[in-house]
Amino acid sequence: MIEMVTPQGFPNLPYLSPGALVTTPQRTLYVSGQVGVDATGQPGKDIGEQARLATANVNAVLAAAGMGPGNLVKVNIYLTDESHIPAFMEAAAGALVSPQPATTLLIVKALAAPGLLVEIEAVAAD
């Protein structure tokens, strides 16, 4: 069972998710960083498309393990440009669970290959 934990008095902000408490997990899945590429390895043309592809790739790994977005307990999001935050949030809004799991968003200089704008790694439990 996964319970989102928000201490009393914490602000209710869309980018703030203090914690996820997992009680009696049977399985834990560590999802390696998923980037915004399609099945042929081609990156999406912009941050919106890459965000949709990266979240779809995370969800595909979850599904392969018999899990879904509701099993996410921790998500780390890496963007290469701060200006991409609004477009990422809009594109990923329907693909990740709400309320969101414990989440960290970082702005990084670059990702593993040129042209990649977003990477998402996650931990899931059931």
Image: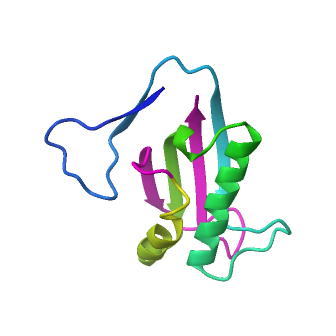
Quadrant holding the C terminus: top right
**Outermost residue toward the bottom in this view:** 45
Q: Residue drawn at (51%, 50%), measured in percent from left and top?
A: 76
What percent of the width, then of the height, locates residue 110? Answer: 59, 67
Quarter of the image for residue 56 reads bottom right
Q: Residue at the spot x=82%, y=68% of the render?
A: 41
11 with respect to 22 (left or right) = left
Relative horizontal placement of residue 47, taking residue 2 as reference (left or right) = right
Give the percent coordinates (x, y) of residue 100.
42, 49
**Most extreme residue toward the left, as rendered?**
9
How many discs mark residues in the rendered view? 0
Q: Is residue 8 above or below residue 51?
A: above
Q: Is residue 67 depicted above or below 96 in this figure?
A: above
Compared with residue 51, is residue 5 higher up or lower down, i.e. above or below? Answer: above
Q: Position of residue 99 (x, y in %)?
A: 39, 48
Q: Is residue 4 magenta?
A: no
Of all residues, the one furthest to the top in this rendering is: 24
Region of the chain picked out in magenta, as a range: 97-126
> For this view, does 54 lie left or right of residue 20?
right
Residue located 51% across and 47% down the image: 75
Q: Is residue 114 above or below residue 100?
A: below
Residue placed most toward the observer, 64 or 34: 64
The residue lying at 67 percent from left, 82 percent from top is 45
Residue 37: x, y in percent? Answer: 73, 68
Q: Quadrant of residue 119?
A: bottom right
Q: How is the image coloured?
A: rainbow
